[in-house]
Image: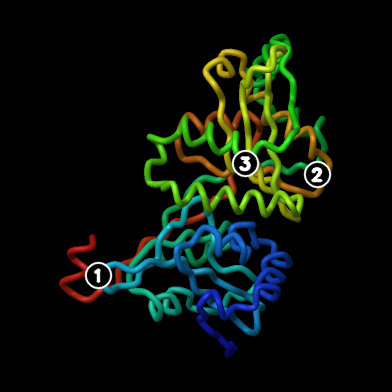
Amino acid sequence: MSHHIDILPSHKIDADKWNNCIANANNGLIYSRYEYLQAMCDNWHGVVINDYTAVVALPWRKKFGFRYNYEAAFIQQLGLIGNINDINIAELIFSFTKYGDILFNFENEQFAKTTHAKRRTNLVIDLSVGIEQIRLAYKKDLLQNLKKAEKADLNVVTDLAIDDAIKHYRSYYHDRFSHITSNDYNNFYQLAQDFSKQDMCFTRKICNSSGELMAIGLFFKDEKRIYNVMNTTTEAGRRSEANHYLIDAVIKEFAGEKLLFDFEGSDLPGVKSFYEKFGAIDQPYYHWHFNKLRFPLNILKR
């Protein structure tokens, strides 16, 4: 079957049609929304197939005159969005860039197999089954930790605290995520502010009876998922298992809705183990690194 395909710079993309494709596709996640890409990518082009029946976002930078794809901050998975499966995505991308890294979404498994893309862990919970059913899958030690948190007299605070969430995340995880720049955080702050006006961003804080911050999380929300974008636990909060309490509180708040709770990872053993305690299942995505540069540049860039 032949398809009409355009690769367009972001300013020439019809934002409404693009977002409509994202909203209607099962694998259209929040990271591929037009405004998300505009906020977080240095530059990006979009592959538009059959008048926005399917799309692919391609974040890019330029170095030494060469354009290359890169992983933009706070974007977990992109890839082909839509139900078209008979397109050679690799060849399309090679016509645009010859080198780079692209993160393909959970429904792009067949493409991942043909390109030998690396599987990455992403853990999710189906919230639609209700809190009682969800908690049946909680691990025993998680249930014990939740009881410990309850005895610590912790409280859930729902006031919007985007500044606090970003500040604490940046402070606690600066070394782990040193590649994230000040400009990235500034762009993310503005994106979160814009999303909050559309009820697509919220924060939750856990405080003790004295009002001391124990844990704080920033979450995005669309018509498909709650995204655990940032969560941070203070030293005092770790002693009282406040992060367990935080995640459980958000799961309880949205339980019964036709949404997934998306933990956003992780392949880090400690983080993965923590998320698995909630009974989360792996819905992997894929990291594709490619190098089609001509000799000798392809050797230098390995």
Write the residue at 62% across / 30% down.
216
Instruction: Name the side, left or right, on which 13 lies relative to 249.
Output: left
Q: 3 or 98, which is in the foreground?
A: 98
Instruction: Name the side, left or right, on which 4 lies relative to 173.
Output: right
Choose mark 3 or mark 2, whichever is in front: 3
Write the residue at 80% across / 44% down.
128
Could you tell me which secondary element the residue under label 2 belongs to?
Answer: helix
Q: Percent position (x, y) of residue 252?
A: 78, 32
Q: Earlier in the sequence, mark 3 or mark 2?
A: 2
Q: Percent position (x, y) of residue 144?
A: 67, 14
Choose mark 1 or mark 2, whichever is in front: 1
Q: Residue 87 carries which label?
A: none
**Which residue corresponds to mark 3?**
228
* Amino acid type at mark 2: Ser
Disc 3 crowd, CA 10 A, few/some/many (<14, 14-19, 20+)? some
Alpha carbon separation for disc pair 3 and 2: 17 Å
Quarter location, residue 125: top right
Write the residue at 64% across / 58% down.
29
Alpha carbon separation for disc pair 3 and 1: 36 Å
Q: Residue 128 carries which label?
A: 2
* Amino acid type at mark 3: Asn
